[in-house]
Image (spheres, rainbow, N blue to C red):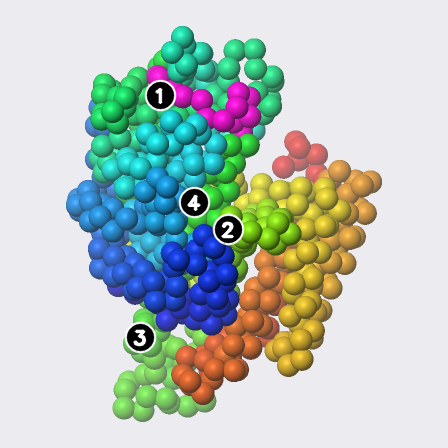
Amino acid sequence: MPDYTAPLRDLRFVLHDVFEAPSLWARLPALAETVDADTADAILEEAGKVTSSLIAPLNRSGDEEGAQWYAGEVRTPAGFKEAYATYIEGGWVGLSGNPAYGGMGMPKMLAVAFEEMLYGAGSSFALYSALSSGACLAIDAHASEQLKNTYLPPMYEGRWAGSMCLTEAHAGTDLGLIRTRAEAQADGSYRISGSKIFITGGEQDLTENIIHLVLAKLPEAPTGARGISLFLVPKVLVNADGSLGASNAVSCGSIEHKMGIKASATCVMNFDGATGYLIGEPNKGLAAMFTMMNYERLSIGIQGIGCAEASYQAARDYACERLQSRAASGPQAADKAADPIIVHADVRRMLLSMKAMTEGGRAFACYVGQQLDLAKFSDDIAEQQHAETLVALLTPVAKAFFTDTGLDSCIHGQQVFGGHGYIREWGQEQLVRDVRIAQIYEGTNGIQALDLLGRKVIANGGVALRQFTAEIRRFAEQPGSPYAVELLDAIERLENLSAWLQQRSASNPHETGAASVEYLHLFGYTAYAWMWARMAAVAQAKRGEDEAFYSAKLATAAFFFARLLPRTLGLEASIRAGSDALYGLAAEQF
């Protein structure tokens, strides 16, 4: 398995140079005394060491061994338990957690950089703490003070983990169909009964307790999604003094045998009258759970970026070493039997595509993180509301576009290796398998696309979209902005197509679903164009400080605008073809 090296230089470029994060943090009172440029760099540096030296070496062996289930208990692969103990000593689970309960209180802009490194080093390992972070967020936002005081400190510490229990065998996306039940008890607790499937980290041997967030229905609850409540159900019951008590009536019935992320335990969880505690209000659990789900959607999107970066590093190094044939322009390594394959146009096409999409995604992830920080920490109500609107609009784009293009990049990386890319020892086939799930869980990418177009654009008349494109237009209209013409053309295409779909969907219910995936991709390429224009502007201004780094940025930006952004033309044509072609066959003709 090739080595993974945390891309610290590029992460600092995005955080400090492109988005000027330290200046933003300095004006947000909750962050001003918590984090500055030096603190951020120290955290990134340490995160790079932890991910590259502690976690990455376990990635292949973890895949080979996988998580193992024995009579209701899960054993993680060799080395995971020891590495996790070291990992939590650094406080990484609580990196962006609420300081009032033991979290470090770091901004999301910094957390997304860490998460990319974590997924790049090993997706399976990353998932055990990613679910804990999301569970903490939901508990902090919606649970009672007593529950927060009891559960958040050991969860931020990493001694206890979290899980998200939504899906049932008959109910995936349509959560209104769930059958898990909750019955109120005299002491204020509830008895939870039912089964959940596909539960990441539902059982493992890394922590002394697992805190399950479970969706269930109370007796006589309204039908459908309106009747769902959210409950906190610990694996081990907690005594009044915070110590661990008896085991709860929670068990792991089995784990799934999967295509990838084999070291991550994906569990069937059974709740047999287990003791649980209501989070938030009765029958409003789905809204509370969405706090966690939206966090996980961005996190899983970042899995696509992390895997793509790992694949790119390996493919780049291989392409510089592998000798095959001569360059079209003549020998480039005359002292060798052949030239490195990086001289060949198709190899360069694949590597540049990987580089452009991964670095564009890294910048866009930081931008979404910036909006999350503004929504959480700004004391300017208008700025806060603006950021909240953008977060809602951009979350489905981040989840789906990061992971769709992340798979594309990992496949490119595998292809660069040729036949060796299909062999397990080189690591590329594992990355393809590991990243594939990211398009499926936390809401399939098709569902994300429907959410974007149907709910976030059409349902509100494009208000949120216009807020986003107005930011891009202000940048593009500044004197000297690079790629201004291409950028203005791209957002005009997005706006015109959005208005056209708004009109079409009013008379044809099929139009939204028919257009949604292509629309999300067109949106994604447009957003990346803005990121690359911003990065190019910084690179132009700073080129003299580091010629090699900034000239590479400018060349990659040129490639993106010349070879990747034009894909929006084909996407537009496909969308404008309408939905009729999708409904030309009767069901029995398939």
User: What is the spatial separation of the Cα atoms under label 3 and label 4, in whole angstroms?
Assistant: 30 Å
Tell me how far mark 4 sits from mark 2, CA to CA: 33 Å
Q: Is residue 137 visible?
A: yes
Q: Nearer the viewer, mark 3 or mark 4?
A: 4
Of badges 1 and 2, the one in the foreground is: 2
Going from N to C along the chain, the mark reached first, 1 or 4, is: 1
Residue at 23% x, 18% y is 246
Q: Nearer the viewer, mark 4 or mark 2?
A: 2
Side of 506 relative to 3 (left or right): right
Label 2 packing within 10 angstroms: few (<14), some (14-19), many (20+): some
Single out the residue that lies furthest toward the top.
Answer: 186
Instruction: Describe the element under mark 2 as helix, strand or loop.
Output: helix
- How far apart are labels 1 and 4 at the CA level? 23 Å
Q: Say if the magenta span includes residue 279.
A: yes
Q: Secondary structure at mark 4?
A: helix
Q: Earlier in the sequence, mark 1 or mark 2?
A: 1
Name the residue carrying label 1. 270
Mark 4 = which residue?
Answer: 437
Residue 25: % across, % down: 46, 60
Q: Earlier in the sequence, mark 1 or mark 3?
A: 1
x 34%, y 63%: residue: 39
Residue highlighted by disc 2: 377
**Of residues 154 and 318, which is closer to you in this image?**
154
Q: Residue 105 in the image: state x and y as whole percent.
A: 38, 49
- Three-letter code for the amino acid on which mark 3 is drawn: Arg
Figure quadrant of residue 450 = top right
Whole-Å distance between the Cαs marked 1 and 3? 51 Å
- The residue where tag 3 is placed is 322
Q: Amino acid at mark 2?
A: Phe
